[in-house]
Image (tube, helix red, strand yellow):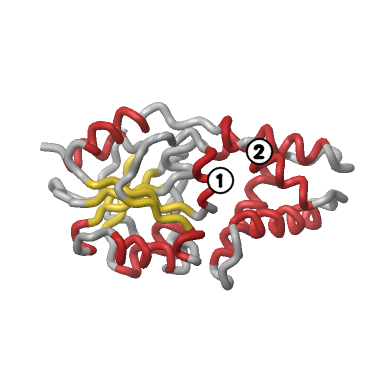
Amino acid sequence: MVDQTGSGRLAPKVMSFDVFGTLISVRDSSYGAFERILDATDARGVDVKAFWEFWEHRNIEQYWEPYQSYRAICETSLSDAFAKFGVRGDPRLINYYFDAFGSFFLYEDVLSTLERLAKRYKLAVVSNIDDDLLALTPLKRSFDLVCTAERAKGYKPDGALFRYLIENAGEAKSDILHSGQSQYTDLVGGKPLGLTIAWINRRGVELDGNVPRPDYTFSDIQSLLGLVET
């Protein structure tokens, strides 16, 4: 199913992608690690998915603050999640999450879609991540441009990471098509800077009325082929 809110075809020169939630199924890949984290504490009856969502929400809140590494942000967010759920635990248990990066898995449409797009367009990734953690993921292909929070010294949605993309893409901003799953980082961060953005709404969630509207909305990245290929 494709819900395309724009019209016509595009001819971008650079196609950039959010990684976690867009290319990598981060929630399903992470729940096992967070179950290990909770098992190592005094937690009783804590819903791992609710715990994960609160932890991720705290990550996003910290992305607006002065830069620190993704590892540091995640550890602070875990400490906050422990407090929220009344759990006594060591925030250094977040290492279970980092240790799981090598076993994360890609969505089924990712490799074939990127291979087709790479024949015609420059490809970039734009990720709120440290370089070493990105290297641990199964996203084992070369990109023309890698934009990480570590390199930009800032995150989505505060604008720093998207400015890094725009400054290093080697093409006009109008020739960049960014695709991402997070309305609160990709849309909030990219649209005010004038980027064209396809919202990859894999989970079928409602668009928050307070965030900028995407130019296009798709349920997967394979659907991008119908937008950019002739």
Q: Position of residue 144 (x, y in %)?
A: 30, 48
Q: Position of residue 182 (x, y in %)?
A: 45, 52
Left or right for 29, reference 81: left
Q: Position of residue 117 (x, y in %)?
A: 23, 37
At horizontal 15% and vertical 38% (from top left) the residue drawn is 229
Q: Which numbered circle lies on residue 99?
A: 2
The tag earlier along the polypeptide, 1 or 2, is 2
Residue 32 in view in this figure: yes
Instruction: Name the image quarter holding the N terminus.
Output: top left
At horizontal 40% and vertical 55% (from top left) the residue drawn is 147
Disc 1 residue type (three-letter): Leu
Q: Position of residue 197 (x, y in %)?
A: 30, 55
Q: Which residue is mark 1?
A: 133
Residue 213 figure quarter: bottom left
Classed neighbour count for the residue bearing mark 2: other residues with Cα under 10 Å, few (<14), some (14–19), many (≥20)? few
At horizontal 77% and vertical 45% (from top left) the residue drawn is 93
At horizontal 10% and vertical 37% (from top left) the residue drawn is 230
Q: Nearer the viewer, residue 69 or 81?
A: 69
Disc 2 residue type (three-letter): Asp
Classed neighbour count for the residue bearing mark 1: other residues with Cα under 10 Å, few (<14), some (14–19), many (≥20)? some
